[in-house]
Image (spheres, grey):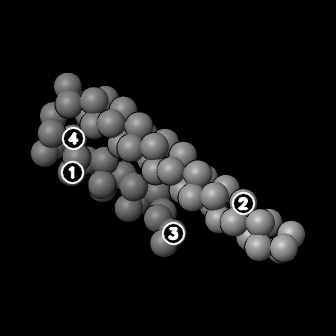
Amino acid sequence: MNLGFGEVAIILIVALLLFGPKKLPQLGRAAGQTLHEFKRGMKNVMDDDNDEKKKIDSK
């Protein structure tokens, strides 16, 4: 899903109108923390999966 500059600008303008300038930094911070936690969880799942494959291959 490729977003161009125009699409991103429209999304930001709509978000600014909906939430106001005081809420946008809080929403951005919350979105960043959520993405960080999701990435960490996915990394843990992938590491666990790789560990299981190594155990199976070593048998």
**Residue shown at the point (79%, 66%) measured from the top left:** 54
Q: Do the residues labelled 2 and 4 touch (CB within 8 Å)?
A: no
Tell which tag, 2 or 3, sits nearer the viewer.
2
What percent of the width, then of the height, locates residue 8?
39, 55
What percent of the width, then of the height, locates residue 52?
69, 66
Residue 20 vs 37, above or below: the answer is above
Q: Name the residue under label 2.
A: 51
Residue 55 vs 35, above or below: the answer is below
| Amino acid identity at mark 1 | Val
Of the residues under marks 3 and 1, which one precedes in the sequence?
Answer: 3
Q: Is residue 57 found left or right of 26 in the rendered image?
A: right
How crowded pointer 3 is (Cα within 10 Å; few <14, some 14-19, many 20+) is rated as few
Q: Are marks 1 and 2 in contact (CB under 8 Å)?
A: no
For mark 3, give the secondary structure.
loop
**Distance (Cα) linking label 2 and label 4:** 45 Å
How crowded pointer 2 is (Cα within 10 Å; few <14, some 14-19, many 20+) is rated as few
**Distance (Cα) linking label 2 and label 3:** 34 Å
**Residue shown at the point (45%, 43%) measured from the top left:** 37
| Residue located farthest toward the right when viewing the structure as drawn | 58
For mark 2, give the secondary structure.
helix
Foreground of the two, 10 or 15: 15
| Residue located farthest toward the top when viewing the structure as drawn | 22
